[in-house]
Image (cartoon, helix red, strand yellow):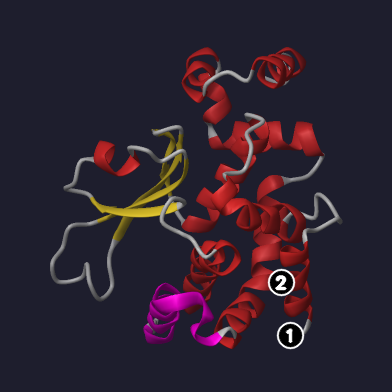
Amino acid sequence: MELTFSLRRKEIVSEEPLVDDVLKQWPALFLPDQVCAEFFQITQTNLTSRFFTSLDEYAPKIIKVYRSSGAACGEGMKSLLEKLDDQTSDVLNYRKATALRGLPMFMDKHSGSLLKDCLDTEPVEDQINSMKMGILTVIEDDVATVQSSPNIRLFAVVLEEQIVVDEVSDLPTAFALLFGLIYALNMDYPKELKYSFETIQKVFMCLDPKCSARVQSFKNKLLQY
């Protein structure tokens, strides 16, 4: 794949092919290791190392920012933080996932199009229909746990209404792979989620020091903690 990088990059940037066409022509590009390799070729930045290191650093601070916002972010954020407070095991990883799940709510006042949940007994096609870019969480259909402490089967990265990376083990990895594929496929951020992705790009990944006013304000709040 490294040998064909220049040719592939030129074609993707100039022709802007559909994700399905890229998937057919270069299926290996969607393998997790190759997503990371492609991202490094483009940015000279280690995708997962930088993302996970930043998440470790910022997750506790992000949660504090969410809490300080009070009711401004609505019932979705309130529910998210209550679930975090009720967590008794694996709290550190749950905090990281909560920080990521809350990002669209806090930065864009929107989350439905980026993160979707479904039971493993439900047709996946119904969930990813009209999903241009996002992450699907597949939950085990167990009445005893689905409301209180759902058993997550897997995460999947979705682009242009199809799953492009399946069997992802955790939400942070799914976020990193989604962001890496945005670069690899030269895709634009969805307008309704532009501040969430800008936060990942400029705060988490440190790829551009110039921030919009909203992202700079969020960054300043993180520095207060």
- Residue 126 placement (x, y as % from top left): 25, 40
Picture mark count: 2
Query: Which residues are the magenta region?
Result: 70-86
Asked whether 42 or 111 is in front, the reply is 111
Q: Residue at x 51, y 49 (%)?
A: 174
Asked whether 73 or 161 is in front, the reply is 73
> What is the quadrant of residue 217 in the picture?
bottom right
User: What is the crowding at mark 1: few (fewer than 14 residues within 10 Å), some, or many (at least 20)?
Assistant: few
- Disc sitting over residue 168 in the figure: none
In the rendered image, residue 197 lying in the magenta stretch gets the answer no
Asked if labels 1 and 2 touch by Cβ distance under 8 angstroms, the answer is no
Q: Nearer the viewer, mark 2 or mark 1?
A: 2
- Position of 37 with respect to 86 (left or right) is right
Above or below 67: residue 57: above
Looking at the rendering, in which quadrant would you find the C terminus? bottom right
Label 2, secondary structure: give it: helix
Using the numbered discs, state the Cα–Cα distance from disc 2 to disc 1 in whole angstroms: 12 Å
Q: Residue at x 51, y 24 (%)?
A: 19
- Position of 9 with respect to 106 (left or right) is right
- Name the dominant secondary structure of the magenta segment: helix
Asked whether 191 or 43 is in front, the reply is 191
Asked whether 82 or 217 is in front, the reply is 217
- Residue 122 placement (x, y as % from top left): 19, 46
Tell me the residue that label 2 is attached to.
Answer: 218
Q: Residue at x 78, y 44 (%)?
A: 45
- Position of 43 with respect to 153 (left or right) is right
Looking at the rendering, in which quadrant would you find the N terminus? top right
Could you tell which of marks 2 and 1 lies nearer the N-terminus? Answer: 2
- Residue 82 placement (x, y as % from top left): 40, 83
Tell me the residue that label 1 is attached to.
Answer: 225
As drawn, which residue projects farthest toward the left?
A: 143
Q: Residue at x 16, y 48 (%)?
A: 121
